[in-house]
């Protein structure tokens, strides 16, 4: 393998990893605070992409990219809050909420995806790349959109991390995830914090959808394959810390890039799952996991 | 006797389908501290968890400072309870409302937030108080020097006594107008226990009314004005501090000669 190939594989792996990290963070945010897996996360990804397309595409409203992205974020946050209210909140106090939430969020996902099909139709679309430009670094070919994606994703993840660590609502969210009862007894507004967590998760899914929509063709079920990968990342990395699914995402991204190069596209998922099974055999709580569910 | 702060009327409750306490009437005035003494497993903690809204009461009313803490009426009938209780009926109590009214419950053996540091935990209590005046962080650190010493440690690395202190400190910051302490000295070493008892006495001296559950009559005597005996899910006796007998006599009153 010559160095240029090696570096471009690493580049591909990092970009995949960044996308997976963004999706897995949203997924683990909900898993750690509410204690459920949100199977509508994939549909959120698709919805984010379509909403952003509606705002930005020349065939639709044709706004500049920045307001389009910001408005998409607001819409996604709102959608997350509403869907939390409809799909999860009525069952939150039940001890079997995990199982019920699987069914309700799957239902929500199906309804959302078919809604997208109904509104925007089956034709494939693509969001205009955020920037157009290319850089040649010692034989390595990079587009500015790729660089921007990496930088933006890292900035967003850093922002969420800081929010959880230093802001009051962020800290309160961590507290609720660690001991719901104690948080309630101090007078924290637990339902509101749950809604914020769900909204934030939907927002990150929407951003992931926008990035995905610029590099691949959009279709209503575009979120299901990334959701699968995000699930693998969350399970593979564990959720002991906010950062553990992020590390796991980059490991999985690089692994996927290398195994695609070495074994081909068809065998890459197999390699991924075999790795995951082996890791889980040795560390059932995930690569960076501890036996607990916290943030 | 000054005005009644906490007024519990004919309260019954428990964990579906087991009823744990029934027909509890309890009045606590603003200047008074009460103790609840009774055998383990007879529903003291369940009663307090109901007061603070963690469990829905089955019937009866809770007033705090004249304000009704529960939704009116009885709990949904047996027929409704077979459905999704939260979707079909509305909860009768909201723990947030109780805490924000100023009735703060410090749980038994509270694990708090294991991955947060002491400072972070106290800052959460500050945001939970959201502007209402509670103790300041400096004041609780003065009351519990150990809490100040350990401020950068995560809660899960603290000892049981230190955790209890942080728990009470957080409760004090969350703007209490009445404090519920559920067996604060349970399972602590004598030295830490003494330190904690001293601090609780300090808190009492500020005039904050306390509802205290403890198994140590000598300690109860220092803090409370009225003692309630609680067994088999009912209040079976009420006595003022002056009428309080020693531990042995109390045990005989509760269990008879052979306990």
Image (cartoon, rainbow, N blue to C red):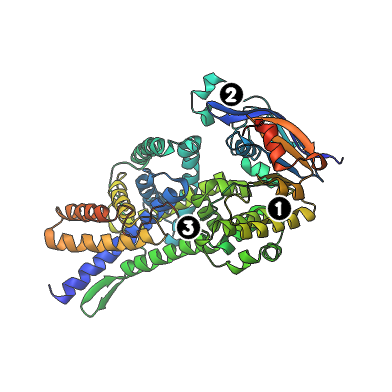
Q: Please name which of the two marks, 3 or 1, marks the residue nearer to the observer.
A: 1
Determine whether the residue tagged by mark 2 lies in a helix, strand or loop. loop
Measuring 22% from the left and 55% from the top, which residue is drawn there? A278
Task: Evaluate if marks 3 and 2 touch, with contact meaning CB atoms under 8 Å apart.
Answer: no
Q: What residue is shown with label 2?
A: B76
Q: How crowded is mark 3: few (under 14 residues within 10 Å), some or many (20 or more)?
A: few
Determine whether the residue tagged by mark 1 lies in a helix, strand or loop. loop
The answer to whether B48 appears left or right of A59 in the picture is right
Residue B9, percent across and down?
A: 73, 29
Checking the image for residue B175, the label placed there is 1
Q: What residue is shown with label 3?
A: A70
Q: Mark 3 lies on which chain?
A: A
Residue, far right = B1
Alpha-carbon distance for marks 2 and 1? 33 Å
Checking the image for residue B138, the label placed there is none
Q: Can residue B127 be seen in this view?
A: no
Q: Residues within 10 Å of mark 2 (few under 14, many from 20)?
A: some
Quadrant that contains the N terminus of chain B? top right
Q: Does A295 appear above or below B229?
A: below
Q: Mark 2 lies on which chain?
A: B
Same chain for mark 3 and mark 2? The answer is no
Q: Mark 1 lies on which chain?
A: B
Which sits in the foreground, A20 or A45? A20
Q: In which quarter of the image is residue B27?
A: top right
């Amino acid at each position: 393998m010559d160095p240029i190939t090696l570096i471009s594989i690493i580049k591909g792996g990092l970009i995949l990893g960044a996308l997976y990290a963004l999706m897995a963070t949203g997924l683990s945010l909900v898993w750690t605070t509410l204690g459920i897996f949100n199977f509508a996360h994939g549909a959120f990804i698709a919805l984010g992409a379509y909403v952003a397309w509606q705002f930005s595409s020349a065939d639709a409203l044709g706004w500049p990219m920045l307001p389009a992205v910001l408005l998409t974020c607001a819409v996604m946050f709102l959608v997350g809050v509403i869907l939390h209210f409809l799909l999860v909140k009525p069952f939150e106090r039940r001890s079997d909420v995990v199982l019920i939430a699987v069914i309700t969020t799957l239902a929500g996902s199906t309804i959302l995806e078919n809604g997208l099909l109904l509104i925007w139709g089956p034709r494939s679309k693509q969001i205009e790349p955020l920037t157009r430009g290319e850089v040649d670094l010692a034989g390595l070919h990079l587009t500015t959109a790729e660089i921007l994606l990496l930088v933006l994703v890292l900035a967003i993840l850093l922002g969420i991390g800081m929010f959880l660590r230093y802001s009051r609502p962020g800290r309160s969210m961590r507290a609720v995830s660690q001991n719901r009862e104690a948080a309630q007894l101090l007078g924290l507004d637990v339902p509101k914090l749950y809604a914020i967590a769900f909204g934030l998760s939907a927002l990150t899914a929407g951003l992931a959808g926008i990035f995905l929509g610029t590099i691949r063709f959009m279709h209503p079920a575009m979120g299901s394959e990334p959701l699968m990968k995000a699930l693998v990342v969350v399970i593979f990395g564990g959720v002991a810390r906010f950062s553990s699914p992020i590390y796991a995402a980059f490991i999985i991204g690089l692994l996927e890039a290398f195994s695609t190069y070495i074994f081909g596209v068809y065998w890459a998922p197999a390699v991924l799952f075999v790795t995951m099974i082996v890791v889980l055999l040795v560390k059932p709580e995930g690569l960076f996991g501890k036996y607990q569910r916290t943030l | 006797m000054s005005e009644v702060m906490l007024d519990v009327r004919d309260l019954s409750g428990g964990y579906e389908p087991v009823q744990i306490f029934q027909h509890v009437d309890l009045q606590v005035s603003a200047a008074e501290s009460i103790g609840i003494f009774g055998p383990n497993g007879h529903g003291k903690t369940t009663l307090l968890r109901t007061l603070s809204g963690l469990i829905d009461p089955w019937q009866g009313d809770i007033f705090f400072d004249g304000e009704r803490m529960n939704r009116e009426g009885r709990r949904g009938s047996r027929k409704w309870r077979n459905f999704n209780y939260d979707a079909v009926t509305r909860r009768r109590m909201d723990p947030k409302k109780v805490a924000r009214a100023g009735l703060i419950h410090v749980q038994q053996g509270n694990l708090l937030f294991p991955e947060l540091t002491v400072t972070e935990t106290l800052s959460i209590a500050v945001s939970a108080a959201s502007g209402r005046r509670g103790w300041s962080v400096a004041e609780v650190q003065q009351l519990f020097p150990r809490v100040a010493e350990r401020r950068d440690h995560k809660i899960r690395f603290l000892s049981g006594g230190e955790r209890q202190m942080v728990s009470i400190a957080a409760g004090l910051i969350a703007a209490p107008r009445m404090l519920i302490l559920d067996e604060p000295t349970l399972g602590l070493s004598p030295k830490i226990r003494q330190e904690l008892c001293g601090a609780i006495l300090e808190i009492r001296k500020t005039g904050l009314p306390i509802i205290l559950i403890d198994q140590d009559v000598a300690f109860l005597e220092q803090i409370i004005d009225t003692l309630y005996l609680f067994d088999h899910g009912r209040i079976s006796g009420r006595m003022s501090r002056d009428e309080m007998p020693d531990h042995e006599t109390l045990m005989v009153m509760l269990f008879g000669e052979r306990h």
